[in-house]
Image: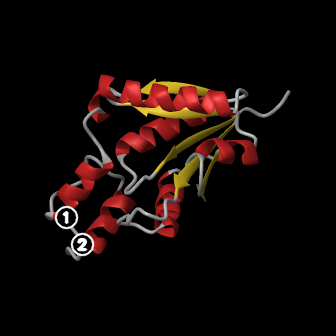
Amino acid sequence: MTERVAVYAGSFDPPTTGHLDLIERGARLFERLVVAIGVHPTKRPLFSPAERVALLTEISRHLPNVEVMTFEGLLIDHCRRIGAHVIVRGLRAATDFEYELQIAHANADMYPEVETLFLPTRTNYGFVSASLVREIAMHDGDVSRYAAPPVAAALRAKFGHAPR
C-alpha cells in the first residue's frame, strides 16, 4: 500500500491557532502531512519563508508525521513532485467555499490523481486569520489566543514590542 501523503498549503504569515488546528487534524488523517508554504515573488510577507518554516516546525514539533517546506509555482506541481494525492483545505465561512471549489476543480483538471479535502474550521477559530493576527500584533495587542507562544513572541519581536 502506498503511503497516504497530504499537503496543507498556505502563506502562513503568521501561522495561527486555526492553522495549527488543521495541521493537527490533517496529521491524524494521513501517514504524512506536508505543510507547504507558498513563496510568491510578488508578495511581501511579514515573515521570510525561512522564518515561517522555523515557526511552523516549532509549533508542529509534537506531530512526528508533519513536515514543513516551501514551494514556488503551482501547488498541484508541488503535489506531483512530492507524491501527494490529497490537498487539505480549511473552510472558515461559506464565502471561502466558492473560491476553494474553483481551485479544487482546476487542480483536479490538471492532476486528476489528486483529491481536495475540505475541513471546516472549528467554531472557535472561524474568525481567526493571519491578517487579523498581524493587525492585532502590529498595535501591540495580545495575540496569545490566536497564535502559539513562539509565533506570538516572533510577532512581538517583529514589531519591536517588549516581551510580555
Q: Residue at x 53, y 54 (%)?
A: 37
The answer to which of marks 1 and 2 sits earlier in the sequence is 1
In this image, 119 relative to 85: left or right? left
In this image, 137 relative to 154: left or right? left
Element on which disc 2 rests:
loop
Q: Nearer the viewer, residue 27 or 98?
A: 98
In this image, 149 relative to 9: left or right? left
Q: How is the image coloured?
A: secondary structure
Local packing at callout 1 (Cα closer than 10 Å; few below 14, some 14-19, many 20+) is some
Residue 58 at x, y = what percent? 50, 59
Furthest residue toward right: 1
Q: Quadrant of residue 44?
A: bottom left
Residue behind mark 2: 159
Local packing at callout 2 (Cα closer than 10 Å; few below 14, some 14-19, many 20+) is some
Of the residues shown, which amino acid type is indicated by label 1? Answer: Met
Q: Quadrant of the N terminus?
A: top right
Q: Above or below — where is 113 with respect to 19?
A: above
Q: Above or below — where is 141 with respect to 21?
A: below
Residue 60 at x, y = what percent? 52, 50
Q: Quadrant of the C terminus?
A: bottom left
Q: Residue at x 51, y 38 (%)?
A: 24
Residue 104 at x, y = what percent? 54, 29
Residue 93 in sight in this render: no
Element on which disc 1 rests:
helix
Q: Residue at x 70, y 38 (%)?
A: 84
- Whole-Å distance between the Cαs marked 1 and 2? 6 Å
Q: Which numbered disc covers residue 138?
A: 1
Of the residues shown, which amino acid type is indicated by label 2? Answer: Phe
Q: Residue at x 43, y 63 (%)?
A: 42
Q: Nearer the viewer, residue 131 or 157?
A: 131
- Contact? badges 1 and 2 (CB < 8 Å): yes
